[in-house]
Amino acid sequence: MNPDQKIYVAGHRGMVGSALVRKLRSLGYENIVTRTSRELDLRQQEAVQDFFADERPDYVFLAAAKVGGIMANNTYRGQFLYDNLMIEANVIEAARVHEVKKLQFLGSSCIYPKMAPQPLTEDALLTGPLEPTNEPYAIAKITGIKLCDAYRSEYGCDFISVMPTNLYGPNDNYDLQSSHVLPALIRKFHEAKKENRPEVVMWGTGSPKREFLHADDLADACVFLMQNFSDYGFVNVGTGEDLSILSLAETIKEVVGYEGKITKDPTKPDGTPRKLMNVDKLHAMGWHHRIDLRDGIERVYAELEDQDWY
């Protein structure tokens, strides 16, 4: 990539897409093309083809997706499968037709089998059953990986895939009905502090372990991989470090300054027992994360004043 080439960031208003735009601009890339979902419905094939015909992007970061936490994934199973299949298929096909130089597809660590050995290595894909609560989303993301590989094989397209671990950062979703665990806990502790509540109820037992990566670190890795990786398969992007949900809750409690207690709700689902990425492949290429989890949480919490609920 060079600063004169046109880059399309699909999903630029989301957490990942907006981090990518920030990163690219910081590196001097100004010829960035974006469209909101109202301006361009990526589920509509003809609209996507017309957009690519008009704009002719050289590079594509495919960060657009329908996303959510356990409740949203499990409730809107049809929407999560259909919408994500349509988005990725339409964009990848249009990138082929209009001869995009390189495309990067962003997936999710939920592609791995529920009981895959930890840490999760790239070769564990499709070796066992998926976590049932987010199976539709996982299937869509697996399809995106395989579509990139198939287009590389059949058409010679330089399409690559990147699998981030659990993410957090600016422009995250704080809706308690559809958010992921970290932003949901930030909101719960902040509101409990503001309203002097004696306790915060945490979903599940608190025992599952999770890995968290700041979206700015992911964006840095994505640009690095766009410049340094061209192959079949995909690359895990994470920190290689995890902690229990209870430990996460205790860290957020400290950052927010909440002084009540944490109560567990074991009637709510835990999800996958552990989800830690093996990032040896990425480290061997020379990339490492920079933002420590506590520092990242402090940064995110300090940036929240423009949120409606804050």
Image (cartoon, rainbow, N blue to C red):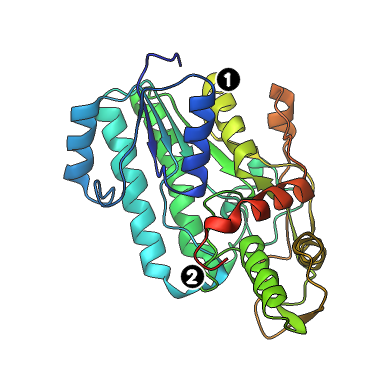
Kind of residue at disc 1? Asn
Q: What residue does disc 2 label?
A: 72
Report which quarter residue 257 is drawn in. Answer: bottom right
Q: Earlier in the sequence, mark 2 or mark 1?
A: 2
Vertical comparison of 117 with 237: above or below? below
- Left or right, residue 218 beside residue 24: right
Q: What residue does disc 1 label?
A: 228
- For the C terminus, the image quarter is bottom right
Image location of residue 25, percent across then percent down = 48, 26
Image location of residue 270, percent across then percent down = 69, 73
Viewer-proximal residue, 240 or 130?
240
Vertical comparison of 305 with 187: above or below? above
Q: Say if residue 27 shows up in the picture.
A: yes
Kind of residue at disc 2? Ala
Label 1 neighbour load within 10 Å: few <14, some 14-19, many 20+: few
Label 2 neighbour load within 10 Å: few <14, some 14-19, many 20+: some
Viewer-proximal residue, 115 or 8?
8
Please tell me whether mark 2 or mark 1 is closer to you in this view.
Answer: 2
Identify the residue at image location x=59%, y=25%.
224
Q: Secondary structure at mark 2?
A: helix
